[in-house]
Image: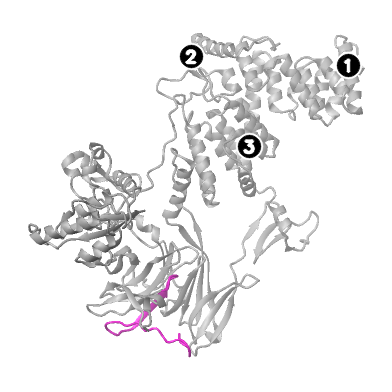
Amino acid sequence: MTNDQVDPIVLPVKQQRACNAAAFNTTGLLATGLSKVRNDFCLMLWSTNAADRGSSRNAVPISQLAPSEAVSSVSFFPDNPNHLVAGVGLKWIRLFDIREGNTAGSAQVFPTKCIYEVTVDPLNPNSIASVSEEGVVALWDRRSLKTPSKEHILLLNRSTEDQARTPNVVDMRYSGGRVSVLSDAGAMHIWDLNESYPLDAPRTLEGTLEKHLEAVRHSVATKPQALYVSRSREVPLGHDSNHTMLFDIAPRTPSGANNYLLARRDGSFTMRAVSARVPQTSFRPTNGFTFSSGKDLVHVPAVNDGSQERPSAAPLSLDATKAVLVGDITATMKERLNEGYSLNASANRSVVKDEILKEAWRCVEDFTVEQSVIVQGYDFTMQGVLGVWRGFSPMPKNNTRRNALGFPAAGKNVEAAFTAAVTELNTKAGRTASTITATTQQPQQRQLALAMIGWDLSDQQLEQQLQGFENTGEHPKAAAWAMYFGKIDRTIKILSKGDQKLKLMSTAVAGYMQFSGNTGSSAWRDLCQSLSQELDDAYLRAIFAYISTGDWSLVLREECLPLRDRVGIALRFLDDRRLGHYLDDVTQDIVKVGDLSGLCLTGLTVSCLDLVQAYVDKTSDVQTAAMIVSYGSPRFFEDKRASIWIQTYRYLLNEWREWHARAKFDIAHGELSRNSSGAMTLKNGQRQVYVRCQYCQQSVAHNLVIPGARGADGRRITVNQTAMAGASAASQQKTFCPSCRKPLPRCAVCLLALGTPADVSKGSHSAARNEVAFDEWFTKQWFATHNARLFIATKMGKGKTAPKEAPADKKDTKLKAATAEKLKAGISFDAVAREYSEDKAKAGGSLGWMVRAGMVGPFQDAAFALQPSTPQKPIYTDPPVKTKFGYHIIMVEGRK
């Protein structure tokens, strides 16, 4: 582009030829793709910055790539100005790193015929699109380097109407998941794409939260996404169809339509609006439906009963949109997550609003008070009332899995052993069976079950509980609890403190004490029975149901009472036979309806899975299901359903991009899986970081490949060659790939090639190194090296050059003596260097910043051994250091 004030920039090339493509990066570099000629490069990179050009009009070529290979298209990656992708040689898509200069090899190569109009999605730099001569669009993912096939992730074929004629592609754009192709057929073809993130995200259990979070991000950032077409359409251009040669995507209109800027052949421009995506529609079970319209959400309610006319639909406001989502389980799970819903039972009780879920998390909190409760070989951890009442087998040796409920056919000896374990557990906790009024042969089991549900209360604890209910205004609940524990006078007193209605009821309850032994008071009993059916409060109904008959069975039928209360009543008042039947019946009922308050019965054992399954079937709340079963799986049981719920929730967190929450969930789940000995039973996922060759994608570890053996990730199984060969193999440099024998890349910091051994004199090659895999060793060695101060500013005084390491002559000896005398006399190091140096260091002796591996061995050892000093008070090498280039007097000015 030129005007009257600015001269054009000239791009000089050795042989003039057609330029097929051009692309700028964000630092002022221009990449040009040229036609093929012999013995010349076809991908040129130029610096257009004025600082590089100076006063010259010619751009400066900074790199030349792709020798003797035609470059059809080129594009820089928006997230890294040093990376570019190009269609090369009519059959390759190649990715380059321009920091390696003219020697840069392609970091990744995709074989394909779709080498034209290569474009990188600016909103997703990992996604690349290209097109073939036949108009077939191929989508690539640069992270698919790890896949052996290196194939495209999606192909977009032209429509069947175009099969008779192959349209020539004029231009293509790829942005925000939308591919737009302009052809000479007089139309623009547009594909709208959607993506899904990898579901097999890693599970890393050991380490800090930062490591977990990095592992989650790495799994998403390094694995290709699955793309699919959500909409495909062809947009006719009308009278612009034969005149448009280029186009680009402009910002959207207020209505949500996409603007396309079309460039005509005559140099003029025009704007064309293309409709947005097809509205998304969702039908509700109630016969209404909701659909999107641009930025609006339109809700159409169901037809009213008795009316054939559907109410009119109108766009919803933000508040109305939220109202539509009320009750939607996905919105509810996301809201809970934002409020801190996690594997913390006490915190979850404050997050959830549903009373049943509050009770469920109270059960979980009670179960997790102690990490492990094992008595006489019986593991009572996470057990519920059913487990204690029915009994269970002791833990097998070397097995942390929990046995099913019930005893094996071993007779009374097994039952007696279990009873002894329960008795010991009660004795240690100081529990007695004084509150149990029923006739029973299993008082210890009842007492332990009462303790599990919080009903093992002393008189003082009961009074504190009742006062707490009174302070919160729950007088009916306090009165009922007082009745449960046989304190009718306390029940009357509590009701008398309530409102006028409760005071009247306290009078009716007082009649129980007068008529409880009188069978002729039928009027009073009929009144109490009537109140037990008509009152709205479940606790009041329970009170009058009992005082009218004295039968606790009527109270147990009051399903509006909390399950914990009903189970406590049954444990205190029912005999063994009736108690067993009641627990079985109520368990079946809660499993049928998916009532999670039943966890107090099942415990967090394998018995809870049917209950959780029913809850998921009813609510689709996989979030709560995954968290609850995480307390028992895989520590106490392994079940496919539990694994599915946990994995599904982890996938959901991935879809929400809640990496932090996913990492926290994995950490907490791993901690919950620790058995009684402290060992983690949840298995770690496969390794996420591998050091692999940039050419053949195989491991750079010098390992022996086991023929025909592959691991779970599809990679070949290898055996460490160094460990097998011993110390002799450890001394060899491994700067090449053991599979393809090509050189490994160099470190951008220290310039050492990947695999270069450290200095043997510093003890880096210890015997321990032979015992670990190469890639693990190199990672540790790299960080150990780069943790040091690598950069060093040096000044040097140098004697006469002796390239063949000839013996020093008399002149060399005089020079060394003269320089040493002047330095000892206090003359500045700069002045001495200018007087005596015989190379480029003569201008003050400064060599600038130097790095390891940038100096010859003796010079490097001496320089890095010196302490920093100043030219006026130098600390220098005395005697001078001798190398094959001569004698050197060295001082160090600084380190960083």
Instruction: Please tell me which residue is depicted at 47% across the width and 44% down the height of the picture.
Output: 210
User: In the rendered view, how is the structure colored?
Assistant: one colour
Residue type indicated by callout 2:
Gln
Residue at the spot of label 3: 348
Residue at the spot of label 2: 376
Task: Name the side, left or right, on which 515 lies relative to 818.
Answer: right
Residue type indicated by callout 3:
Asn
Q: Position of residue 109 (x, y in %)?
A: 32, 64
> What's drawn in magenta, residue-wise?
1-28
The reply to whether callout 2 and callout 3 are in contact (CB within 8 Å) is no
In three-dimensional space, the C-alpha distance between marks 3 and 1, rounded to whole angstroms, equals 41 Å
Element marked by disc 2: loop
Q: Quadrant of the N terminus?
A: bottom left
Q: Position of residue 212 (x, y in %)?
A: 46, 43
Q: Is residue 629 magenta?
A: no
Residue at the spot of label 1: 510
**Which numbered mark, 2 or 3, is in the foreground of this view?**
3
